[in-house]
Image: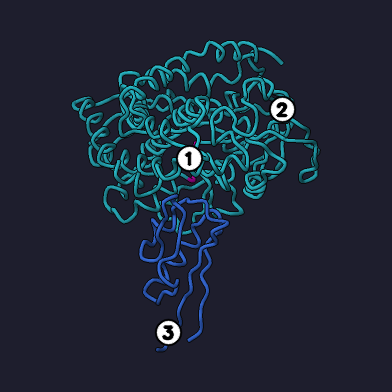
């Protein structure tokens, strides 16, 4: 199929993760699929599967024999057209398979380990406070435009050592990658082939080669695998990964948590009154509003839980649906701030566990702490005008707030 | 000594560095340079840390932590 998608009438046989009904509120659709059709199929995007239960999502996440991560964003491009040859993929290590995956990941992990990330907390807090300062005196503003969307991009751009005023370049690129997935394949290929982002990254890489500094760009340029510097495609690919995976996702988690709190006065009062609730509350927001659905490609024809999967079929990996599975999380659709047992998979499961999870979790906590301490009481000024992002990352893109106190 | 002890263990093959255990019980777990969990010391903890040990285990997304009672 080419062109924008037609409306979905049957979620079991013709689902589309960019359909307006799904984008508006996917949870009832997923709940129904978990109960009646745990592996749904659609011919869209050249053939796509949707396993919706925690059990099935886990099984796919742990299976690197039958599923490849070579491409992780479902779109109308036939898999492979843009990819580097396996096993590196276009944005290592998220698009890499074993054994190269472990090598590329191991190199990056120390930069994102808990203690390294803790050192960035003062910078994030300062950024949040400055953003809130600029809302000072306004009784109504858009929390997505004026607050949430600036936080992760500021952090990632700062970590890479790029000029902060270039943040818009990233935001535009990310929207193209993650949201414009329903455009015709050829149009999308043309868009990527223009290579604007590569030209920009090459400029930053040259600047860092001339004047190395203490940031992730210089870290990647210095890094070695088996005594060799990384290929330039690897450096650029990892930069693209950090931007695509580190910005929209965290922005979405912060926004969805604020959206929840705007709708639940009891929860915001509880959080403002009791700091001991915060650790479980943050994990509960991550569970209930996990922003990221991953994807895999089927490596070869094989039978999977009674379905025949075919080579190059897409398969969405909906961690947000796994997190709402009543078999694993009692009262799964309710946010319980002190939920004691919470093995959520917001950051994935298995070898591709989100590299930036410690960073994302810290950003989410600091952004909410600073917001609640500045604005303990608030509500949506126009609930109907809240819009949600389309595709595999879910979060509010417009969030009109009225400040009450 | 009347109380029983608990033995805590992390399965290194299962651990993917989610960091939930270290956040819940830094008295029991540490993380290495890659962010993967390790148990501090010999892994034996007393009653005062039992709740934290069990909480760490029941919040591990990868089911990598086991807590076993060791008779006295």
User: Which secondary structure, mark 1?
Assistant: loop
Q: Are marks 2 and 1 in contact (CB under 8 Å)?
A: no
Residue in view at x 20 percent, y 29 percent = A133
Colouring scheme, one of rainbow, by chain, secondary structure, one colour: by chain
Mark 2–mark 1 distance (CA, rounded to whole Å): 24 Å
- Can residue A193 be seen in this snapshot? yes
Q: Nearer the viewer, residue A195 or A336?
A: A195
Q: Are marks 1 and 3 in contact (CB under 8 Å)?
A: no
Q: Where is residue B3 drawn, in percent x and y?
A: 42, 84
User: Which secondary structure, mark 3?
Assistant: loop
Q: Nearer the viewer, residue A233 or B48?
A: A233
Q: Where is residue B12 drawn, in percent x and y?
A: 54, 59
Q: Nearer the viewer, mark 1 or mark 3?
A: 3
Pointer 2 or 1: first along the chain: 2
Residue in view at x 47 percent, y 23 percent = A174
Q: Main secondary structure of the magenta part?
A: loop
Asked if residue A191 is positioned above or below residue A278 in the image, the reply reads above
Indicate the chain coloured cyan by its letter: A
Q: Which residue is mark 1?
A: A289
Which residues are drawn in magenta?
Answer: A287-291
Quadrant housing residue A22: top right
Q: Which mark is residue A14?
A: 2
Q: Which mark is residue B3?
A: 3
């Amino acid at each position: 199929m080419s062109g924008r998608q037609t409306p979905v009438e049957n979620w079991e046989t013709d689902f589309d993760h960019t359909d307006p009904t799904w984008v508006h509120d996917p949870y009832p659709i997923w709940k129904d699929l978990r109960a009646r059709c745990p592996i749904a199929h659609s011919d869209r995007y050249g053939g796509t599967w949707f396993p919706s239960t925690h059990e099935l999502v886990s099984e796919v996440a742990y299976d690197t024999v039958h599923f490849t991560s070579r491409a992780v964003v479902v779109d109308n491009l036939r898999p492979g057209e843009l990819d580097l040859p396996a096993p590196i993929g276009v944005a290592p290590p998220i698009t890499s398979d074993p054994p190269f995956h472990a090598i590329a990941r191991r190199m990056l992990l120390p930069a994102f380990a808990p203690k390294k990330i803790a050192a960035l907390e003062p910078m994030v807090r300062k950024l949040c406070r400055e953003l809130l300062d600029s809302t000072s005196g306004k009784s109504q503003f858009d929390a997505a435009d004026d607050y949430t969307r600036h936080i992760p991009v500021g952090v990632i751009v700062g970590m890479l050592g790029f000029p902060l005023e270039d943040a818009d370049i990233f935001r535009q690129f990310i929207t193209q990658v993650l949201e414009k997935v329903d455009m015709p394949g050829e149009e999308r290929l043309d868009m990527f082939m223009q290579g604007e982002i590569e030209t920009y990254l090459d400029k930053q890489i040259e600047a860092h080669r001339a004047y190395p500094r203490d940031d992730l760009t210089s870290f990647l340029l210095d890094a070695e695998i088996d005594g060799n510097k990384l290929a330039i495609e690897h450096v650029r690919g990892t930069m693209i990964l950090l931007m695509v995976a580190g910005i929209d996702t965290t922005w979405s988690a912060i926004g969805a948590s604020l959206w929840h709190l705007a709708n639940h006065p009891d929860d915001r009062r509880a959080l403002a009154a009791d700091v001991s609730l915060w650790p479980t509350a943050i994990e509960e927001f991550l569970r209930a509003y996990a922003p990221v659905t991953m994807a895999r490609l089927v490596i070869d024809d094989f039978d999977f839980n009674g379905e025949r999967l075919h080579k190059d079929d897409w398969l969405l990996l909906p961690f947000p649906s796994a997190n709402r599975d009543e078999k694993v999380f009692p009262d799964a659709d309710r946010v319980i701030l002190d939920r004691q047992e919470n093995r959520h998979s917001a950051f994935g499961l298995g070898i591709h566990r989100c590299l930036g999870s410690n960073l994302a979790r810290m950003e989410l906590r600091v952004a909410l702490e600073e917001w609640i301490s500045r604005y303990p009481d608030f509500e949506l000024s126009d609930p109907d005008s809240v819009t949600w992002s389309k595709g595999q990352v879910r979060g509010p893109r417009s969030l009109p707030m009225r400040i009450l106190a | 000594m009347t109380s029983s002890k608990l033995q805590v263990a992390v399965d290194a093959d299962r651990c993917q560095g989610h960091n939930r255990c270290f956040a819940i019980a830094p008295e029991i777990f540490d993380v290495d340079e890659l962010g993967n969990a390790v148990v501090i010391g010999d892994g034996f903890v007393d009653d005062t840390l039992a709740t934290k040990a069990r909480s760490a285990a029941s919040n591990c997304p990868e089911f990598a932590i086991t807590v076993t009672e060791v008779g006295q």
